[in-house]
Amino acid sequence: MMRLRPGMLALTLAALVAVFLLMPLVAVIPVSLTPTRYLSVPLGEWSLRHYRALLDNPAWAQGIWLSIRIGLLASVVATLLATAFSLGIWMLRPAFAGLMMGLALMPMVAPPVVSALTLYFFLTTLSQVNGIVAYDTWAGVALAHAVMIAPFAVVLLTVALNQVDRRIDLAARSMGAGLGTRVFRVILPNIRFGLLAAFFLTFVLSWEEIGVTLFITSVDAVTLPRLMWMGLRDNIDPAIAAISVVLIALVALVVLGKTVWHLCKTRNM
């Protein structure tokens, strides 16, 4: 099979676009090495004091751990809800499927301020009857994040299900398979990559969520994005540049690892 390879001009243009997109990220690196107590580009002197501040200040570790817990719970809830919804639409094909899909995607298209205010009043109401899933609790934040990110999982899983041949479900049904067998042994294995993609995307969206988080948290549930926002709003702490470099490095390592794995897999084939 003949493979088309990009020419030198296409590679050059792609490299220029990549450099243009990466320049704002690269500019954060020297700022994180400034010896001053405010955001500035170092002039002659470099320092790792702000990286040490990340280790010395327990608030950063607590914010990271809280964001991970919230992201995992929110992504699991969002993926489960999206899977149940998408499977119901795909298997039953109701006449009002379009209306149901529009309602499911409402948090995606609604203004963030409207969603944030709605979730704020909802969680404050829950605070009157319990102290777990409530305002300014990590479970309450996870629930709010799940509401905001579930539509993205619905889109991914709907696309994945539309690529599944319905005849395999009909064949399983004709052979006497029950609903549970059809779902867990026939349909879900065929969309496993869609499930993984939905889980990963929703986790990333929850990890970086800040708009809704500002409305539904106060002093107890301080996620990493909120902690960074507080640092910029209150005292413009250069440690924010340091944590940004750490996150950029982690993402770069993941992307490079995925690229190397893909190249090795392609060569083995």
Image (cartoon, helix red, strand yellow):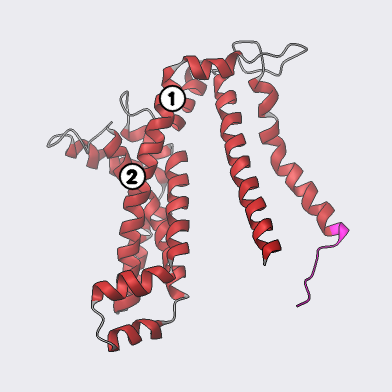
Identify the amino acid type marked 2. Answer: Leu
Label 2: which secondary element: helix
Quadrant location, the N terminus: bottom right
Residue 198 in sight: yes
Residue 114 in the image, given as x and y percentages of width and height: 35, 45
Horizontal side of residue 120 vs 223, given as left or right: left
Quadrant location, the C terminus: bottom right
Q: Which residues are magenta?
A: 1-9
Horizontal side of residue 153 vs 135, given as left or right: right
Identify the amino acid type marked 1. Answer: Ala
For residue 33, which quarter of the picture?
Answer: top right
Q: Residue at x 62, y 41 (%)?
A: 253
Residue 164 in the image, given as x and y percentages of width and height: 44, 77
Q: Residue at x 70, y 40 (%)?
A: 22
For residue 135, which quarter of the picture?
Answer: top left
- Dot 1 or dot 2, earlier in sequence: 1
Q: Is residue 102 magenta?
A: no
Residue 178 in the image, given as x and y percentages of width and height: 23, 78
Residue to which mark 2 is pinned: 73
Label 1: which secondary element: helix
Residue to which mark 1 is pinned: 61
Of residues 102 and 182, the one drawn nearer to the viewer in this rendering: 182
